[in-house]
Every structure is written in C-alpha cells, then in structure tokens.
Image: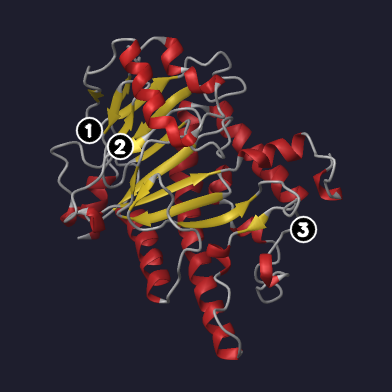
Amino acid sequence: MRCKREAVIATKHPTLTIQSTFPNHIRARYCYRPRHNTSLIDAQVFSLLREHALLPVAPKVLPPGTDILIPSTHPDAGKARPANWLIKKANLLTGDHVDRIMEAFARALELGCKPHIRGGERTDGQSAFHAGAFLKPCASKSLPWVSMDTLQPPRSSGPAAQQHSMRRMAAMVDLCLAIDSVLNTRGQNALKRHDPRTLTRSRRLHQTIRTASHQDVDYGRLQSNPFPPGIFDDITRVLRFGNLRTCVAISRGQAEKLHLDLNDDNAIYTSIMVLGKPEELWNSSRHQGHLYLPTLGVMVPMTIGDMVFFNASELPQLVIKLDEANKHRHTIVTTFTCAQMADVLEHPPAFCLPWMRP
C-alpha cells in the first residue's frame, strides 16, 4: 500500500513557465515599499488593483499537478534576489516524507506540546507552532534565540514537570528533524535545478549562522542549553532545515489573511509544504487551499505533497480558507529565515557581541 502511495505522490511533471500579465510596477510594488502599514495591506492591495483596472478581473487559476515557474521581474533577480517570484513543485514529497512529518507532529501534540505565540490578526484557525533559531536584534535580544515552541519549558516546578518538558522538547526536535530530512533532499534538489545561485546563498548564510553562533544561543528563561551533554551541544546544527532555513511554522487547518511576511529574508525563498492524507482530500471546488498572489494575478493550486518556494516578504499572499468540515485535513509547513540574521552577520549593530563581528 505504501509503494502505491509513493508512486502517486512522487510523480515527475513537466515545468510550465508563467509570465504574469500584470504590469511590472504592480508586481514589484512591495519590493520597494517593505514597511507598509500591515493593518491596511488588504485595502492597499485591492485599491491598487482597482486603480489599474485589474479588478474585478478574476485571477488566473494555474493548472494543478504541474510544476510551475513564475520568473521574477525584480532588477536584482538572479543576483541578490531569487530568480523567480515562485517555484511550485507538484507532488514533490513521497508518502514516506508526508507520513514522517505528520506522525512527528501528531506525536508532539499527543505529548501536550503547545504553541507559545497566539495566532495574529492575519490567521484564522489553530495557532501555528514556530520552531527554530530566530534573530530579531533589539535591546534585549542580541543573540540568536531558540523559540519557546521548540524548548517547551516546564509548566510547573519539580522533577516530574522537568521530565515532561524534556519529552515535549524531544518531540519538537524530532519534528524539526523530519522536516529537515525532506528539505535536505527534495527541497535542495528542486532549488539546484531551478535557482542554483539562491541555493548557494542559502547554504552559505546557514553555515555563517552556525559558525558565528556556536554555543552563543539564547535559551530564554531556561538560561542554558537544556539538552543532555553530547546530544545537542549546538542547537543550530539540529535546527538546520536542509541548510535552507532556520525557522519553521507548522499548523493544522490554518487559513491566512492577506499579508506580507516582512521578517522573512528576501534574498532567499520561503517555502511551503502541504501535508495530509490522500483519502482525506479537501473540497477545492472554490479554490479552497489555493495560494492567492493578487499582485501577480494568479492562484496557485496546492495539494498533498506539493512544495512551493516564493518571495513571502515581497508578494502579498493568502491561502484560501478551507470549508469548516475540511480544515482538519490540511497541514501547512512553512520554513523561512529571519531577515535580521543576514543583516546582523553582515552589518553588526553597535551593541553586537563578539560572535556577530566578521
């Protein structure tokens, strides 16, 4: 049964290159205006489209089951920025890949793992888990910090609470390693084929982060590396996500409202993996589960086993909400790197610590 499922999910597809019909100044608008008022993004985008008579024109729904490239029109595309606005690899993940991640996620939930960041105004549904090494320099955070979702700190005092915390933490690490195993093979191979320059940039940045932050990581209120000696001495080597990203957000049944991921590094791709059970496909007759990119004028079908790489900090985006009866069937894994990681390593702030300096 497993072999049959793998054959369905791992099928290769021809690549379709799509050029957006929208004017370049519409597509690239948010490349040059990265600090917009996030609470007004919905109104801003649709007002812009109406102004140029691009509404009520329906977005182009791209074909399902097809590998898709949308080349970037950014002036630095293929140089300092990714070569494509979007790369979609249909059915990239095998049944084993999907099962390993979903089983690890289910195990974490069974052990009582909980997200520590509540869903914001842009989300509708279950709050996402945010695991990985983050960096957003400020007066109180000048080191890479491991998220509380990763560490799952004790919820009370005493040895029993500490043991439960360690089990939850181990489950979150297993989830991270399951995601890493997919990105380290299928994810890297996809980028090597379609944008090798950005793949090289991702690997180089990740190596720099690991070298610079060796044993200098903020573990929050746990104060020090909580793992037993010799197991995970350097957490950044565990949270590598295929040497492509440093962070992951994972949620079951989450629907996004229109937004930009301004904290994602715009020099590399943010990626989405779509997970679920083949026997529990959701109703997509009204494009439920599709990725809508209004400034490109397209809807990208996303189903189980698909993987999408795109410029999440520059393209306003939303995932069309699933029907209430179907939302539990839909698990989204988003991997990214904080933009501030590269900024701090390349241009250390005045308050930087020794590891931040070149």
Quarter of the image that includes the N terminus? bottom left
Q: In this view, does 286 lie above or below 152?
A: above
Q: Quadrant of the C terminus?
A: top right
Residue 14 seen in this snapshot:
no
**Residue 90, which numbered label?**
2
Q: In this view, does 230 lie to the left or right of 198?
A: right
Q: Helix or strand or loop: what does disc 2 sit on?
A: loop
Please identify the quarter of the rendering in which residue 17 is found. top left
Instruction: State the separation of the CA atoms marked 2 and 3.
Output: 39 Å
Q: Which of marks 2 and 3 is in front?
A: 3
Kindly report the distance in space between the C-alpha atoms of the residues bearing marks 2 and 1.
8 Å
Q: Which of 57 and 241 is in front in this view?
A: 57
Identify the residue position indicated by label 1 in the image: 64
Question: Nearest the camera: 32 or 250?
Answer: 32
For mark 3, what is the residue? 216
Which badge, 2 or 3, is on the more N-terminal residue?
Answer: 2
Q: Nearer the observer, disc 3 or disc 1? A: 3
Q: How crowded is mark 2: few (under 14 residues within 10 Å), some or many (20 or more)?
A: many
Q: Quadrant of residue 145?
A: bottom right
User: Residue at 17% of width from left, 41% of height from top?
Assistant: 284
Q: Which residue is drawn at 41% across and 50% down?
A: 333
* Classed neighbour count for the residue bearing mark 1: other residues with Cα under 10 Å, few (<14), some (14–19), many (≥20): some
Reply above or below: 67 against 70: below
Q: What residue type is labelled 1?
A: Pro
- Does the CB distance between marks 2 and 1 fall below 8 Å? yes
